[in-house]
Image: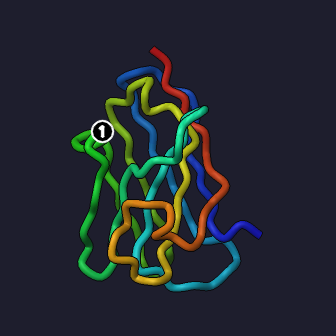
């Protein structure tokens, strides 16, 4: 069973908005933070945004700062990504992930222990 389930992806025109959601499914766990990554065809999975529950700090890739907002509910292991002013370069499969080890960094896939299956986001011009 996939521990995290994403939803909210879809097809949108450039300049539009989407809101992604991610929630724990079945398995009970406690996370120290959660994040969003994305992967475009033929490219490496890249960091998008993360939130650290203990201090409420949020982190963003430079490419999405000012356009995307991460929020969430730590005790429920739920995280959201509000994406505004979308661009074609934002196209990809978006994955949420949970950190169970209090990783010092939340910017790399290796910092996370649980992943969802991903949701497709396609931005057309």
Residue tagged 1:
63
* Residue 81 locus on image (x, y percent): 41, 51
- Assign the C terminus to one quadrant of the image: top left
In this rendering, would 83 be left or right of 2? left
**Residue found at x 30% / y 38%:** 63
Could you say which is closer to the camera, residue 74 or residue 65? 65
Above-or-below relation of 47 to 113: above
* Residue 80 locus on image (x, y percent): 43, 57
Above-or-below relation of 47 to 32: above
Colour pattern of the rendering? rainbow
Above-or-below relation of 66 to 47: above
Could you say which is closer to the camera, residue 23 or residue 48? 48
- Assign the N terminus to one quadrant of the image: bottom right
In the rendered image, the residue lying farthest to the top is 125
**Residue found at x 27% / y 63%:** 58
In this rendering, would 5 be left or right of 99? right
**Residue found at x 47% / y 75%:** 99
Q: Quadrant of residue 87?
A: top left
In this rendering, would 45 be left or right of 105? right
Above-or-below relation of 27 to 109: below
* Residue 10 locus on image (x, y percent): 58, 34
**Residue found at x 41% / y 52%:** 47
Task: State how many labels appear.
Answer: 1
* Residue 62 locus on image (x, y percent): 26, 43
Task: Determine the secondary structure under disc 1.
Answer: loop
In the rendered image, the residue lying farthest to the right is 1
Packing grade of label 1 (10 A; few <14, some 14-19, many >=20) is few
């Amino acid at each position: 069973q996939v521990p995290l389930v994403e939803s909210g992806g879809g097809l949108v025109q450039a300049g539009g908005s989407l809101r992604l959601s991610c929630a724990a499914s079945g398995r009970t766990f406690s996370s120290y933070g959660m994040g969003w990554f994305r992967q475009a065809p033929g490219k490496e999975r890249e960091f998008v945004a993360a939130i650290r529950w203990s201090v409420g700090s949020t982190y963003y890739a430079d490419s999405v700062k000012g356009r995307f907002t991460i929020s969430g509910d730590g005790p429920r292991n739920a995280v959201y990504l509000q994406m505004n002013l979308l661009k074609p370069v934002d196209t990809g499969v978006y994955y949420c992930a949970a950190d169970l080890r209090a990783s010092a960094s939340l910017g790399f896939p290796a910092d996370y222990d649980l992943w969802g299956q991903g949701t497709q986001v396609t931005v057309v011009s």
